[in-house]
C-alpha cells in the first residue's frame, strides 16, 4: 500500500479501505472542519452501493449520530424492475439501516407508485384508466425497429415541443439487450444519451487494440 501511495497509484477500493481503517474519532477530525454545521446527511439519487461503501455509510452515520437518510427507491414486490437492487437493499437492512415508507399522497396513489408496482410485470393488476390520455402503446417487429421508433418520437419532442433531453427517460427491462442498438440509433438521430449500462471491457477500443497487439507479438 505504501508503494502504491508513493507512486500515486491508488484505486478507489484502496481509498475506501484506508477510510475504513479509521476510527469514528479519526473520521470526525477530518469531517468536522470541512462540514462544521452539518448534523444530517441525505443521499438522494444513489441506490447501488458496494459493501465497502455501505460500511463507509455506517461510519458516517455514527459521525452524525445516526442522522443519515438514504432516499432508496425500491419495491420488493416487483423483481422485474428492482431485482438489481435486492442485494443492496438486503445489505443496508443487515447493517442496521431502518426502513421508512414514504406515505405522502403523491407516493401512495400517484403515477410513479403505479409504475413502481407494475412496470414489466407479465400478470399485473387490472389496467388503470387514470392515465389513458398520456400513455400510449405501440409495437415493433424487432428491437432495431423498436428503438428507431423511440428515437423518432424523441426527436419530434425535442424539435416540436422544445422538451429538454434531460427531461426524457427511456426505460428497459434488461438494458443490456438494447445498449448497443440504442447507442447506434440515437447517435444517428443526434440525440444525446446517458445510458446506465456498463460497456463490456472486450468492446473497449483501447482493450481491442492492446489484445490485437499482443496477438502479433
Image (cartoon, rainbow, N blue to C red):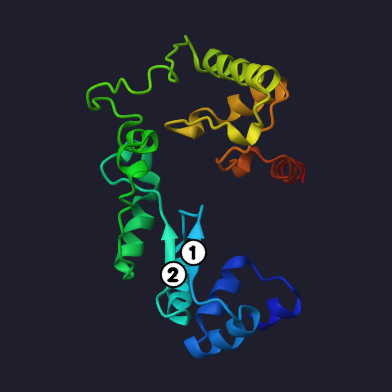
Q: Is residue 122 left or right of residue 11?
A: left
User: Who is closer to the viewer here, 14 or 162?
Assistant: 162
Image coordinates of residue 32 in percent, x first then y, are: 59, 84
Image coordinates of residue 89 in percent, x first then y, are: 35, 56
Q: Secondary structure at mark 2?
A: strand
Q: Secondary structure at mark 1?
A: strand
**On screen, 145 above or below 203?**
above
User: Who is closer to the viewer here, 7 or 217?
Assistant: 7
Mark 2: give few (<14), some (14-19) or many (20+) Cα within 10 Å. Answer: some
Q: Quadrant of residue 121?
A: top left
**On screen, 92 above or below 165?**
below
Image coordinates of residue 21 in percent, x first then y, are: 51, 83
- Identify residue for label 2: 68
Q: Decide: marks 2, 1 in contact (CB < 8 A)?
A: yes
The residue lying at 62 percent from left, 38 percent from top is 194
User: Who is closer to the viewer here, 217 or 2?
Assistant: 2
Q: Is residue 45 left or right of residue 206?
A: left
Q: Is residue 155 left or right of residue 120?
A: right
- Identify residue for label 1: 42
Image coordinates of residue 35 in percent, x first then y, are: 61, 78
Residue at the top extreme?
Answer: 141
Amino acid at each position: 500500500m505504501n508503494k502504491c501511495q508513493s507512486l500515486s497509484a491508488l484505486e478507489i477500493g484502496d481509498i475506501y479501505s484506508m477510510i475504513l481503517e479509521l476510527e469514528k474519532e479519526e473520521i470526525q477530525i477530518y469531517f468536522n472542519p470541512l462540514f462544521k454545521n452539518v448534523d444530517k446527511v441525505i443521499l438522494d439519487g444513489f441506490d447501488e452501493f458496494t459493501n465497502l461503501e455501505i460500511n463507509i455509510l455506517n461510519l458516517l452515520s455514527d459521525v452524525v449520530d445516526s442522522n443519515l437518510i438514504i432516499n432508496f427507491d425500491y419495491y420488493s414486490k416487483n423483481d422485474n424492475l428492482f431485482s438489481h437492487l435486492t442485494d443492496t437493499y438486503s445489505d443496508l437492512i443487515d447493517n442496521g439501516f431502518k426502513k421508512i415508507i414514504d406515505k405522502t399522497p403523491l407516493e401512495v396513489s400517484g403515477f410513479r407508485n403505479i409504475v413502481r408496482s407494475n412496470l414489466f410485470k407479465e400478470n399485473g393488476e387490472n389496467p388503470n384508466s387514470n392515465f389513458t390520455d398520456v400513455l400510449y402503446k405501440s409495437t415493433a417487429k424487432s428491437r432495431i425497429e423498436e428503438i428507431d421508433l423511440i428515437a423518432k418520437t424523441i426527436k419530434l419532442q425535442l424539435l416540436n415541443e422544445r422538451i429538454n433531453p434531460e427531461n426524457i427517460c427511456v426505460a428497459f427491462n434488461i438494458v443490456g439487450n438494447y445498449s448497443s442498438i440504442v447507442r447506434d440509433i440515437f447517435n444517428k438521430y443526434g440525440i444525446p444519451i446517458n445510458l446506465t449500462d456498463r460497456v463490456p471491457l472486450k468492446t473497449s477500443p483501447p482493450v481491442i487494440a492492446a489484445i490485437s497487439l499482443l496477438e502479433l507479438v
